Image: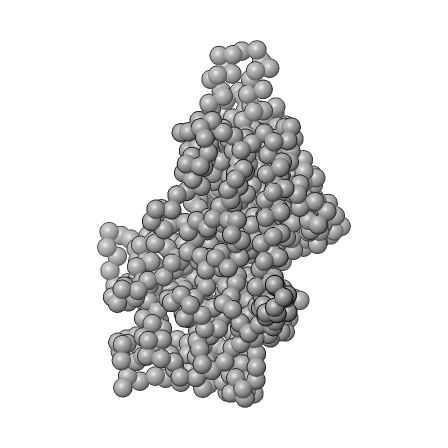
Amino acid sequence: MELTASTSLSLSRAFAPTISSKLHPRYFHFFSVSVPIFAKFQSTSSVPPKFSSSIVRSSGSISAKPSSELKKKRADSQQDLKLRALRELFSKPGIGIDAYIIPSQDAHQSEFIAENYMRRAYISGFTGSAGTAVVTKDKAALWTDGRYFLQAEKQLSSSWILMRAGNLGVPTTSEWLNNVLAPGCKVGIDPFLFSSDAAEELKEEISKKNHELVYLYDINLVDKIWGDSRPKPPSRPIRVHDLKYAGVDVGSKLSSLRSELGDGGSSAIVISMLDEIAWLLNLRGNDVPHSPVMYAYLIVEMDGAKLFIDNSKVSIEVIGYLKNAGIELRPYESILSEVESLAMRGAHLWLDTSSVNAAIVNTYKSACERCYGSLGNESNKSKHNAKSYDGYNGQSGGPAAVYRPSPISMAKAVKNHAELEGMLNCHLRDAAALAQFWAWLEEEIQKDVVLTEVEIADKLLGFRSKQAGFLDTSFDTISASGANGAIIHYKPEPDNCSIVDAKTLFLLDSGAQYVDGTTDVTRTVHFGEPSARQKECFTRVLQGHIALDQAVFPENTPGFVLDAFARSFLWKIGLDYRHGTGHGVGAALNVHEGPQSVSFRFGNMTPLQIGMVVSNEPGYYEDHAFGIRIENLLYVDEINTPNRFGGNSYMGFQKLTFVPIQAKLVDLSLLSISEIEWINNYHSQVWEKVSPLLDGSARQWLWNNTRPLAKP
């Protein structure tokens, strides 16, 4: 649903003065910086709730078994059958492998993927968004990170070994393969599902034990055993993203990209990241849950562009739009043949090997070798076979690969004026929906109405769906009561979730996709009387949140430098959390985007720049007890400091999220005067900006929850 003109205009005027004019020169500039990003904190499982019983007979006696236990046994049996079927394929003609690796990703390295690409979840039963499964002829292991340890413990059958990645003494996938396989084995992968960098690293590591990495281009073994029960590919139509939200037209974006290509010694580029394609072409799709993107590849050359996509998704209107932009349509499956054609035409092809899959990169390499080989000049072939560049300003006579980070990643991350305006506007509407939701939930809890985590998540969706421009959730809502809150990526299921009541902490992490922007917000509340321990932990998380929000830092500062700001108050009493503090967020795009982040992972050297959006979400989790997280979205802006040491500009953050923080959970004795002032100032802004969008009980709830606090 489109925003009404009056709503859009009034909100636009309200916020226009707050958006830095420093953004305008950045509209058309592309930056050649890209690093791996680390995802955020969502997805699945639960502690045992109330359960129903089934009667089973054993040795003449009758015993009651929880239905959840019976389902788990059936699921375990199904996973064992899948493993057996998978292993039977290892020895088939044309395959001949000793192990097979199943990653989480699709062919575009997406975090969220369509159901028909959820191969790792299908084979292992583990449904978290991050993980890698490895199956040998007699073993099966799954690697995941600290966000998912508890979930994986619940979902994996006894046939699987859980590898808690990052813990001391836990081997990597390649180290484990080198340990369990006899020297000289063959390890199979689907090269479409691995970035070129990841495949090359794996190849190098397993070669230490003389193992060979086998690219199975023509068959995915999981798809083979999935068979007819595999879901159909998504086929919903794509749409044009309105220029009033995009801020820059597709022609200008393509022109800037072509300038970058020329400066980098390239004549063409393959783009495979779905959000980069959507952003560059000002298109949006419906192929992936929670993310408004479509499955496609894009090749941009100096004199044209080709979009590889299922034609059934493209309406007459979109065909005309693409034609006007000089973009031709090609079948999705023809990407490799076009890559080969580029080599035959002597293209200097820009490839970001951190994101473009190994199938594409290796196809281009092989085509280049054939091209030079066909010239019958072995010395020339040898010379050009190694021709790759981190940067090259000339053009040789034959094809070459130019290995450089995607120039689109940073351009997309640095939001222009229209994108930030849309983010600000949609966050206000989202805040109104959340106020209505919290007012409703508090009243229901006070009346002792029995509500499950799933029912609460569904109710929140109902409030959001009434807001102008609402399209979808931006990730699966984490509605987590009590101990479930300690499962960082918890997702409640209808037949296996808990009741929300006044006795425990309740963590709600949720977000939405609107036509003009993307939201992501977490609040932790208690509807009764929190314990002193819970209040101390909550308050220290809040202090970290405030410290990051108030941070001022010189230009070119990478996000990892700021991560300790959010952790230091927990560190003082020996506590911490197992996830990054902040991730980038797209403008009406992926809720997790790079290249920027705020994380303890110090390998990400991407500087925070004016216009970038990041989350601020420190937390604390006690296994099997409770979880706490407080999350706002922020955007980077220039700060007017009294000094400019070294001639540097200094940066800070402006808020996008305006939702009250529960005062009941705050231990005021731990806070400084300035921290209390921050809370009061924030709540004053929340009331000022959101109350005009509310009436009745929701407006009263907002008033009650934005009253000033005073130190006792």
Q: Which residue is drawn at 42% across and 29% down?
A: 209
The answer to whether residue 686 is visible is yes
Up-down: is 598 above or below 206? Answer: below
Q: Position of residue 687 (x, y in %)?
A: 46, 80
How many dots with numbers? Answer: 0
* For residue 557, side relative to residue 219 (left or right): left
Closer to the camera, 141 or 312?
Answer: 141
Q: Position of residue 549 (x, y in %)?
A: 36, 66
The answer to whether residue 677 is visible is no
Q: Which residue is drawn at 70% across and 39% down?
A: 331
Q: Position of residue 313 (x, y in %)?
A: 72, 50
Closer to the camera, 64 or 411?
Answer: 64
Closer to the camera, 302 or 701?
Answer: 701
* For residue 229, side relative to residue 643 (left or right): right
Q: Where is residue 194 in the image (x, y as percent from the top left)?
A: 53, 39
Q: Residue at x 40, y 29 (%)?
A: 208
Quadrant of the drawing holding the N terminus: bottom right
Up-down: is 525 above or below 421? Answer: below
Quadrant of the drawing holding the C terminus: bottom left
In this picture the colour scheme is one colour
Q: Residue at x 46, y 50 (%)?
A: 162
* For residue 521, side relative to residue 286 (left or right): left
Up-down: is 290 above or below 354? Answer: below
Up-down: is 686 above or below 350? Answer: below
Closer to the camera, 170 or 419?
Answer: 170
